[in-house]
Image (tube, coloured by chain):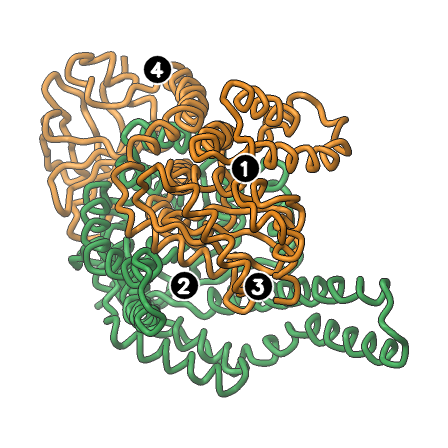
Chain colours: A orange, B green
Amino acid sequence: MQTTWPGYYLDGKTADKEPVRVELSINGLKLTLADGTAIYWSYQEIRQVAGFYGNDPVRFEKGSDIPEILIVEDHEFLIHLNEFTPQKAQRFHNPARRSARFRLTLLAAVAVAAITVFVYAWGIPFAASVITPYVPVAWEAGLGKSALNVLAPEDHRCRNPKLTAALQQMVLRLTEKEKIPYNISIYVTDTNIVNAVALPGGSIVVFRGLLEKTKSPDALAGVLAHEIQHITRRHATKRIIADSSTGLILSAVSGDVTGAVVYGAKIAHNLAMLSYSRKDEEEADREGMKMLLSVGIDPGGLIGFFESLQEKDAKNANVPRVLKYLATHPDTAERIAKMKAAAAASPRPSSPAFPRLEREWDRIKKGCKGK
Amino acid sequence: MEESAEKATEKPKSYYFTFCGTGGTLFGIQIVNLFLILVTFGIYYFWGKARVRKYIWSQIDICGDRLSYQGTGKETFFGWLKAMLIFGIPFLFFQNAPQLLGAPFPVTIICIIMSFILFLIFLPIAMIGMRKYRLSRTALRGIRFSFRGRWWEFARIFYGGLGLMAITLGFYRPYWDMRINAYIMQKTFFGSKRFDFDGKGSDLFGRYVLSFIPVVFAIVLTFLTIISHIATPLSRSTMLLIPLLMFIFVISFFISQFIYGYFSKKYTWNHMTFDTVRFQTTITFGGYFWLYISNLLLLMVTLGFGLPWVKVRTLRYVMDHLTLNGHLDMAAIVQDAQLSTATGEEIGGFLELDMDLA
């Protein structure tokens, strides 16, 4: 076993590098400078700062702020040091154990993949559902307001008085039996899209395309009942928290903690881009049906509306089953079947819920075009 | 006396730089960091960052001596907490509170202005703070580097230059860049000795103008396209030309920035001095271009996982082409370490600033 090694000593005061002879001893290293001066470093006061990879020179430091330095270029030095005094050399790297380090790195890679999948699939949705109930309604309203300006800009909103009155009547009817902490406001926007969006805090944006597609006020009330469920069950807020957490994970993965904080804060701006999970959509369908039936609105209108949408779905009939499952909205046929089952299980009202609106519906629903 | 006369007659020497690290090792370090970041809910990020820097710094060999990084995760963690307190929280508040609380429009505007003012104040603080912290934790042969500039001095050069850039429609850029380089270099020390920079914006101006040839080409192309279609009614194929021209314009802008980046980098290295030695780089346009393109391809093919190899390739290319020429008396360099906290470093992190070694 080799017990003496050539090295370099740096005193931390100048950049001058002095050749030194390093001698291994039981309790420390003896450094002999070219002029014969001997310095003794005990193992306890030395720390290794380099020489962990490849053939890197081994570097030991002694002292705290501006340390003295010992450099041994041959990394075999560490192997011999570990053999010479295994107990005391435990605090230093042993190149003989590098294969174990490689295995641990591989294990870390597998663990990273597993943790990421677990956190994304279960951890984040769970955390979001726990945190969401504690978000103040005022915050939700603020968030919803900023998204409202994106989805329904002031100059695109329909302000037809008859239409506004009809929508107010529907909201009053839908919420008459359930006390909800939100002030529900409906905004119709002059955009030819068959969709409606619920925003946190109580706003619902109905696009003209959807309004014109409904055959009766009962059908629109059905859509509104579905959207009200998204609001009362705080699906959008839950989604924001989940997305912020996803941003946090992504930033952690890319190694940027600050970015995660910024991402979390910015997500509010992207509210308009959010989509609900399949589970949330199913819950809104189910609870929306219950809401309709509880206030005596015939779900037949809503079912009819979905049946008309089904025609559009027929084009996508060749979509593989896996992709259908991955879609956020449940399959339309499946939704219709579930609604029909729920409707059949309860007594259905014999007359339309909004008879006056029913008569004028064709005119009212066209009250948005051209504002 | 005799010794210094002897040194003066000594032939100038070349000191070579080498980067000895490997992409595989850096990747391994980052994987382990990732694991520890996840299990510590992000806290380990600061320690992981220090580990990566320790590795990269320790792989830079300057004529047989390795650089060392002596910063710690604890320092940057506390620096981050302080940065969040004095900058991050107020900045995020002004940026997001109006939306969250549904504030009226004038309040929203005031908050946006306030966040912009905060940004303007803290940008030079972060740029200087990052340099101060990183250099104060970097050592060669046990001697620490240091940066002794002041943020308000830098802010004067930075914002003054920005104003002149606006007035001159960007033509001030090489002068601005060289003024910044000169300030930074003249405030950078290795132990007791100072770096210097003798570059001038006027030397680089011609190459800066030349680098805009691709943009001029794109403008001419756009102009000719408009002229040739002006008499004909808008058709579908004409409409398709608009995004194509925009794409060409963006690409040409990036190419011109790349060309200027190359000239500016090479000129900067070649006009840097330290004590009695001068830096010299032998990078070539072809080599730099290939490095850039191949790195881009590597990142695309590996979906970003090739980043450690990109870093290593870049450092290797730059270091392999860099030398120090002259005679350097290392024994005459004495320790003169300066104190610095990591707050500016972490404000820089918040603003996504970086300070590359290459």
Say whether residue B290 is visible.
Answer: no
**C-beta proximity under 8 Å, tags 1 and 4:** no
Q: Earlier in the sequence, mark 3 or mark 1?
A: 3
Question: Dot 3 falls on which chain?
Answer: B
Q: What is the distance, in whole Å, between disc 2 and disc 4 at their CAs?
A: 42 Å
Which residue carries the number 4 mark? A96
Residue B326, label in figure: 2
The answer to whether residue B167 is left or right of residue A325 is left
For badge 2, the amino acid type reads: Gly
Which residue carries the number 1 mark? B306
Q: Are marks 3 and 1 on the same chain?
A: yes
| Disc 4 element | helix
Camera-side residue: A86 or A21?
A86
Between disc 3 and disc 1, the foreground one is 1
Camera-side residue: A333 or A153?
A333
Between disc 3 and disc 2, the foreground one is 3
Q: Are marks 2 and 4 on the same chain?
A: no
Residue B262, label in figure: 3
Task: State the image quarter where residue B186 is shown.
Answer: bottom left
For badge 1, the amino acid type reads: Gly
Question: Dot 4 falls on which chain?
Answer: A
